[in-house]
Amino acid sequence: MIQPEITKLTPVIGAEISGIELSPPIPVDTAELIYQLLMEHQVIFLRDVYITPTAQLELAESLGEPEQPHPLYPHVPEHPRVMVMDFDGKNPQDTNVWHTDVTYKGNGPFASILYSRIIPPVGGDTLWASLCAAYDALPEGIKSEIANLRAVNDLGDFRNNFIIGEPDGNADKLNQGYLKMGSAIHPLVKRHPVTGRKFVFCNPAFTVHVEGMKATDSARLLTYLFSHITQPEFQVRLRWTENMIAIWDNRCTMHNALYDYAPHRRVVHRVTVINDRRADQQQRTELKIVS
């Protein structure tokens, strides 16, 4: 394998990688390198990569199991696990808020792979934030305060999909939405299963209430945490070009896909990886040793 060039983009998150060949079959050492770089930098970018949906799926499978077809978004023909996110002025984007994917579920996905197909002439950047760096920068008193706290995550902004047309005093569709999408309670501080780093686990889109607190006290604490974790010092910002790949560790990052490019069009293909195959294998090995 040709030694790739690795350019670190900020002190805490993000790196751009060049010199990696991703035509299938992907060599084992290449897959291992991508994984290690992802663990180190939390989000990695590869420009001028020309891959097919089959190759994108193979890249995802080198990390873990690709997610089942999305119930709402369309997919690439004959590739149901390759989601198509196609937005313009007539079809507005709905992901332009800081979020970690589906924290309203008990177990969120490990990673996502985004491949750019059509990019607007200006705008459409994506930002990622390191929740590890955000935790490290918290005052020690706040670290102690949130160390054993948990928070409720629910469908958040997706409420808007279930309240259109509901009359005043009624919320039947919204209640059905809660049943369909669910809620989950997560610790406000988690430890990364591979790197061992602690990180803040909350996000403005889906984290709504701190367990055991009055609503006003919960709102005060969450407002502080949201303000803290969205500081520019913890972020990397990507200016997309066509035929570019972004891979991020969803467990310890947030992202925000800006919708500032209407009426222009932005099309990306996305594959979500639900589990970290290497971490799972390591855990099974450790369990066998203990037993």
Image (tube, rainbow, N blue to C red):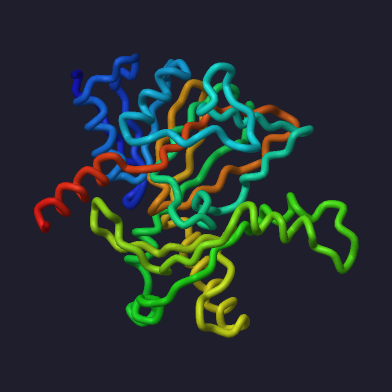
Extreme residue toward the right, this view: 167
Residue 277 in the figure: left or right of residue 257: left
234 shown above or below 69 = below
Identify the residue at image location x=57%, y=43%. Answer: 257
Report x, y in % for residue 114. 48, 32
Q: Position of residue 290 (x, y in %)?
A: 11, 58
Residue drawn at x 35%, y 59% is: 133
Image quadrant for the N terminus? top left
Judged from this view, the residue extending furthest toward the front is: 291
Residue 61's quadrant in the figure?
top left
Callout count = 0
Indicate whether 218 appears above or below 172: below
Judge by depth and name the residue closer to the eye, 263 or 204.
204
Q: Quadrant of the C terminus?
A: bottom left
Q: Is residue 273 left or right of residue 27?
A: right
Image position, residue 211 (x, y; %): 51, 77
Q: Position of residue 173 (x, y in %)?
A: 77, 55
Left/right placement of residue 4 relative to residue 257 reads left
Residue shown at 62% from the left, 47% from the top: 96
Q: Residue at x 33, y 15 (%)?
A: 24
Q: Quadrant of residue 64?
A: top left
